[in-house]
Each structure stands twice: as C-alpha cells, then as structure tokens.
Image (spheres, rainbow, N blue to C red):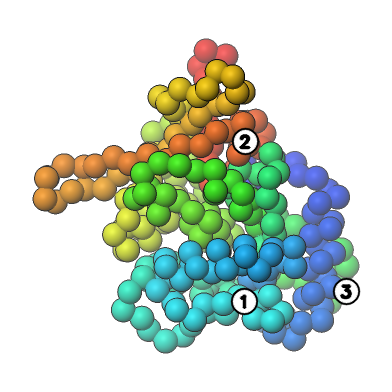
Amino acid sequence: MKPRTYRNSFSSKMIDVCLLWIWLIVGGCSALGSNSGKVVVRENVSATQRQELITSLKSITGWSSLHFDHQGVLQVESEPVASGSATARSLLTRAVDGNKIIVLEDASSRLDVAFCRVVKARWLTNTGTRLPAFVVLIDFADFHEVIGDKEARAAFNVGWGVLHELDHVVSDSTDSDAQGLLGECETHINAMRQEIGLPVRADYFYVESTLKADPNFNSKLVRLSFEQYDSNRLRTRRYWIVWDARVVGGLSTINQTAAVQAIRSHRN
C-alpha cells in the first residue's frame, strides 16, 4: 500500500542489512543482469515458507512449475495455461522481466509488519548501473492467525499479500486513503480473484469485529469483508476473515501496512 510503505520511516539498519544482501547476491548472480529485474527470495525465508508461498502462487496463477531456483530467483512459465488468473500471471511476468530488483524477506512475528509490507531500498555501493530495488517483508506467521469463512481465507493468504506488494512496485499503484474507496492496487488484485472465482475484497479498511474476545486476554479482534454474487439466489453473499490485531500488528497508524489498514476512530 504505497502511501504508507513508501513515505513512512523504516529502520535504516534493517534496510542496510537487506540491501547488503542484495549487493552480495545480485553482484554474484549472472541470472540478474543489468537489463532485467528479478524477484529473488532471501535466505532467511525457510524451505517451508517458500513452499507455502509457491503453493499459493501456483493456485492463483495456474502455473504448475512455478518455483525458486537454486539461487533463489523466481522462475515463471512461458507456456499458456487454461486455468488460473491471467492478470496474476501478467503481474509476475512483468515483475520478473522488468527493470527493478524485488527481494522477498521473512519478517514473521514482527509487530511493525502486518501480513506484508514493501519498502523502497537503496544500494550500498555506487559502482556500476544499479536498478531500483525494493524489499517485500512477509510476516508468514500473521497469515496463520486468520480465521473465518473458507471462501474469504482462500482470497486472503500469503500469495495474495505478495501479489499486492508486487503490484505497488510493478504498476506503481496506490492504496485507498479514504473510507469507502477500495484503492487502485486492491482493485487490480480483485480482478485476479474474480478470474478464479473467488470473492472480492469489499473494503480496504478493516473494522472492529462483532465477535467478543475473552476478557482475560488483551485481544483486539478485527475483521475484513469479502463478497461474491450468488447467481442461484440472485444476491450478493458476504464473507469475513477475523484476526487479533494485537498479535498480527498494524494498530499503529504509522505502521499500518500493505495488506490491511485500520479505520481511524472518530471518537479520538
């Protein structure tokens, strides 16, 4: 969600660590030439996490052989497929073949990252031609905290979160900054959901859940809505996902991030 992630401050030390890794890996990786951008996964993303992300992206795109190679570079397919989202395939292709370096990094259990977040980064060396670089921070643990309708959960997982961030980088898309508006980026992601028959995100902002948390625990349950038209019943069905914002993070207006953002209370 570009307005928040690009303008807000982020730990300079963390960005330096990320970009030092880019400098070391990209500098020694012949697959990442100066004429093409690549999506690469950092070594701190475990094999299990990589598999979770790839499995999700395969389901969305329909690409059965999508994978990270031995250097951590995302490899996409060129052959046409009959299933999956054509829009999602186009986005991944543009990310891989574009003119920007995108690094995927594990940021699990960090309260300053809710689901996913992208930060614009800088190179640590000025030698040679340097492509624009971005780091997508992924809190894999957050996606395991989500409960709710299975239809909505299928439309909101780590694959969708990463695609959202990639769209910010590749399409230069923006997020909503006003209640009632979905935003340019999430409109693109909804088109992908529709192409594979999933509910679309109805709101950009999450709201306080009607579910009551155990008073013995310091919880703040929030929910996000999705909807899909039911042609058999001639009505729109609504689906929900719920999570504890105190566990997932994103409560701070400074660090509300890519996948979700809270409505500011008018009572404050």
Q: Position of residue 51 (x, y in %)?
A: 57, 68
Left or right: 139 in relation to 34: left
223, 178: nearer the viewer: 223
What residue is at 33 percent from the left and 74 percent from the top?
A: 83
The circle on residue 198 is none
Q: Quadrant of residue 23?
A: bottom right
* Residue denoted by label 3: 127
The type of residue carrying mark 2 is Val
Marks 2 and 1, Cα distance to the nearest angstrom?
30 Å
Q: Position of residue 164 (x, y in %)?
A: 51, 55
First reached walking from the N terminus: tag 2 or tag 3: 3
Instruction: In the rendered view, tell whether residue 190 sits above or below residue 83.
Output: above
What residue is at 18 percent from the left and 48 percent from the top?
A: 230
* Residue denoted by label 1: 68
* Residue denoted by label 2: 247
What residue is at 37 percent from the left and 39 percent from the top?
A: 240
Image quarter of the C terminus: top right
Instruction: In the rendered view, tell whether residue 91 sits above or below residue 249.
Output: below
The type of residue carrying mark 3 is Thr
The type of residue carrying mark 1 is Phe
Q: Secondary structure at mark 2?
A: helix
